[in-house]
Image: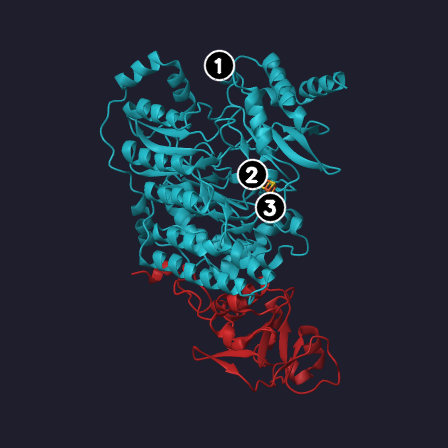
Chain colours: A red, B cyan
Amino acid sequence: MKNLIRLVEGQARIVHDDPWQLVRDDAPQAAGALILPLAHWQARQDAEVLAGNRLSLQGVLLQPDDDPEALAEWLEVLPLVAIDFPSFLDGRGYSQAYLLRVRRGWCGEVRAVGEVLRDQLAHMRQCGFDAFAVREDKSAEDALKGLAGMSVLYGRSAIEPRPLFRRRG
Amino acid sequence: MYHYDDYDRALVHERVVQFRDQVQRRMSGELSEEEFLPLRLQNGLYMQKHAYMLRVAIPYGTLSADQMRTLARIARDYDRGYGHFTTRQNIQFNWIELEQVPDILELLAGVDMHAIQTSGNCVRNITTEAFAGVAADELLDPRPLAEILRQWSTVNPEFLFLPRKFKIALCSAEQDRAAIMMHDIGLYLYRDEQGEMLLRVMVGGGLGRTPILSQQIREALPWRHLLSYVEAILRVYNRWGRRDNKYKARIKILVKSLGIEAFAEEVEREWQHIKEGPAELTDAEYLRVASSFQPPPYEWLPDVDLTLDTWLAQEPSFARWVERNVMAHKVQGYASVTISTKPGMAAPPGDVTDVQMSMLAHWAERFGFGELRITHEQNIVLPDIRQRDLYALWCAACEVGLGAPNVGLLTDIIACPGGDYCKLANAKSIPIAQAIQQRFLDLDYLHDLGDISLNISGCMNACGHHHIGNIGILGVDKNGSEWYQVTLGGAQGKASALGKVIGPSFSAEAVPAVIERLVQTFVEHREADERFVETVNRIGLGPFRERVYAAAEATL
Ligand code: SF4
């Protein structure tokens, strides 16, 4: 994917050679490192992967209606989970990322795709996203500036489990 | 009131810097209006009919004299010399230039204020009742938990793009003066026999197009679980609330479609995962926040003030004001005063000029402990006034047009800005309010009528809370002209009720006469000292309807 920002050990970088390709409608001839909607992903896996015995070569795209719990049995074999923002006004992806990280303890990549814009990146980061495919008409360089957000977080988040009242001092 | 520390201050200042940058990017065209929209809404900035409107947060309606002076300065320097207090206990400035907003926000940050989340599909200003901490019937002070919730919901990253706006209110008195049952989440705070603070949690209330009163989802929730429980509700709502139709997106629709039991089960399941954890509130945090709300240094005063008694006997208009605008206080010798912003023709409901704001700040310092409150009836409360100063305060208030003795009376009208300002309006509210006020100028008559609430909204969005007015007036559009539908029997408080429509709507000119006939019907049927709404409940809509529509036919 183009225009990708990734956090590696807390450092944000623009990635120029990302191999992943997002395929929303499964074209059977598509090959390579694909990210697929859950149903298509499932259809492509063989029994070994579905049984959790071998790693999958494809990543999953969670759409807003999907329940992250649906991935529970395959978290061991997934290389990556992408979460879709069909509109930046749709906030379901934040809860999905939170649940994947905190409830399921998923440590792999969680990538925001779709309407991913500079002014939402800090919120996404706090909810556990660590890769951001910035909408292609926008500059990724520019979007980097939105990643830090504000220094104060009152509540808690996937990356800071303690609310401010436990950190205040 | 709550005192900001370095964290609180850093947040509001960083937010100004962030928004200044966003405004610049909007003006350079780097951000499209569509992209800018949620950013400006979450900073309280709306586009109205003629100009931008900025809504400033007044958390749970409490502000200091200095903060009030800053609002006066904004009204004077950046607006047209006035501001409008809203039914959400906030203030709105109606004539704002986009490029000046960052400077205004910086002024606000300088006095620990902001406009964060006063709009947009996120958790809005937390409200509680205006007499918190001073009301004689208070069981507990709701403000520490309101402040804790305010902080937790401010820029909470998971819940900034909810399906729709989300309002939370808290109340802890015998009487509910915070309209708890019309909130997305309403919290009643009380103590059990062991003295433990508990919460009764209500969910799914709201006015608007589909008015619904909230239902109880949980009884006896220990206060320590406040944040995790609200988080569980919000997560369920964020994930499953409807997003396909904005009129069906509030949590009330989700609660209604699942049914309260199924919704409660969902919440319970989510909550089980998070209830034991770092979100559990601590005594230390409660005490830290509560220390900001310690009672001020009250003097020991006699219960009966002789000078007050003398003035009451000598000045009937003062006595009338005391009867309506002064409320009992916890502390002997003190009183809480409500300054009415409903003088009639002189100003629309809720509008206060910069000079009046400065005077209010001055009185708060001179007669009280420097604190003011905004009520959801759009009036202003001076919470701690010595009884012996009531007369001096009344004289000063009368001099600047703030002496209206009509709190709770028919002319204490709650009205949204309506068609004069608001793009969404079907009809104007302000001229209707003023025409009704003009019709009821006889103060003796008004006082005899007693408590009647009259609420006006310019459209279905119900910012004027017309559903819970004893008399509700709703602006409707009839082939491009402005008409008004009338409801009767609405009420707020623990006996909340939604008003019922009396019949076909009326033209603007007809409204004052309609109200007059409703009132006459009440007077004819009233038993002893019955309140208007009690009479309506006892005799039903029939007699009111007959009177109003018979008269309408006679004039045809
Ligand atoms: S009720 Fe309607 S007209 Fe009145 S302020 Fe709200 S949206 Fe505008």
Place of residue A61 in the rendered image (x, y in percent of width and height, measured from the top left): 63, 74
The chain to which mark 3 is attached is: B
Q: Amino acid under label 1?
A: Asp
Instruction: Give a yes or no on whether discs 3 and 1 share a subunit.
Output: yes
Residue B179 lies left or right of residue B551; in this view the side is left
User: Is A163 or A24 nearer to us in this picture?
Assistant: A24
* In contact (CB < 8 Å): disc 3 and disc 2: no
**Separation (CA) of disc 3 from disc 2:** 11 Å
| Picture quadrant of residue A148 | bottom left
> Where is mark 2, residue-wise?
B417
User: Is B437 or B297 nearer to us in this picture?
Assistant: B437
> Where is mark 1, residue-wise?
B444
**Separation (CA) of disc 2 from disc 1:** 29 Å
* In contact (CB < 8 Å): disc 2 and disc 1: no
The chain to which mark 1 is attached is: B
Place of residue A144 in the rendered image (x, y in percent of width and height, measured from the top left): 48, 74
Q: Which of pointers 2 and 1 indicates the residue nearer the eye?
A: 2
Is the CB of the residue bearing disc 2 within 8 angstroms of ligand 1?
A: yes
Q: Which of pointers 3 and 1 indicates the residue nearer the eye?
A: 3
